[in-house]
Image (spheres, rainbow, N blue to C red):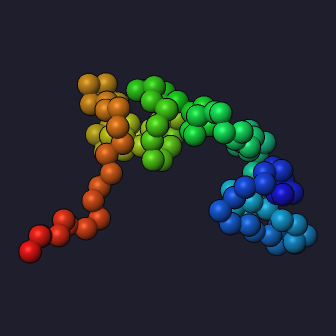
Amino acid sequence: MCSHCNTTKTPLWRREPLTRRLLCNACGVYLQQRNRMRPADLTVTQCDGDTDISGGLECSHCHTHRTSVWQRSKTGAKLCNACGVYARLHGFDRPLAFRKDRIRRRGKYPKRMQS
């Protein structure tokens, strides 16, 4: 169990450098990058299986709950990946007409030819 946020599930366990206490990946990375412990408002309670996988997050622009990555706007509002990338590249909000209900993944390899 993480000594900071009390989570029991994480893809990687880490240790606090000075006290060697066990930390979850999120708390360990935050400590490593910012030299301070992760704030309580960023620690998320453990999912019981009945809640949405996004943890209740919603894009402040298009109101979607599904995205591969969550981002923040310049004002600090939560954005889905599509709205965040569009705003960063174009300098203004993504038109709502561009919203899709599916996450489109990019293919990593070209399709093989049948011989």
Q: Residue at image x 75%, y 40%?
A: 45
Q: Which residue lies furthest to the front in this view?
A: 115
Q: Which of the pair 29/44 is nearer the observer?
A: 44
Left or right of 11? Residue 97 is left
Would residue 73 be visible to someone looking at this image? no
- Residue at the image point whose x is 49% and y is 32% from the top: 65
Which quarter shows the C terminus? bottom left
Residue found at the very far right of the displayed protein: 19
3 relative position to 111: left or right: right
Question: Image height check: is 81 above or below 14?
Answer: above
**Where's residue 3, x and y in %?**
87, 57
Quadrant location of residue 86?
A: top left
- Quarter of image, res 12: bottom right
Residue at the left extreme of this rendering? 115
| Above-or-below relation of 31 to 48 | below
- Closer-to-camera residue (31/15): 15
* Side (left or right) of 18 relative to 51: right
Left or right: 74, with 86 as reference point: right
Q: Which residue is drawn at 74% across and 59% down?
A: 24
Is residue 67 in view from this perspective?
yes
Q: How many marks?
A: 0
Q: Position of residue 114 (x, y in %)?
A: 11, 70
Q: Which residue is drawn at 79% across and 62% down?
A: 23
Which image quadrant: the N terminus?
A: bottom right
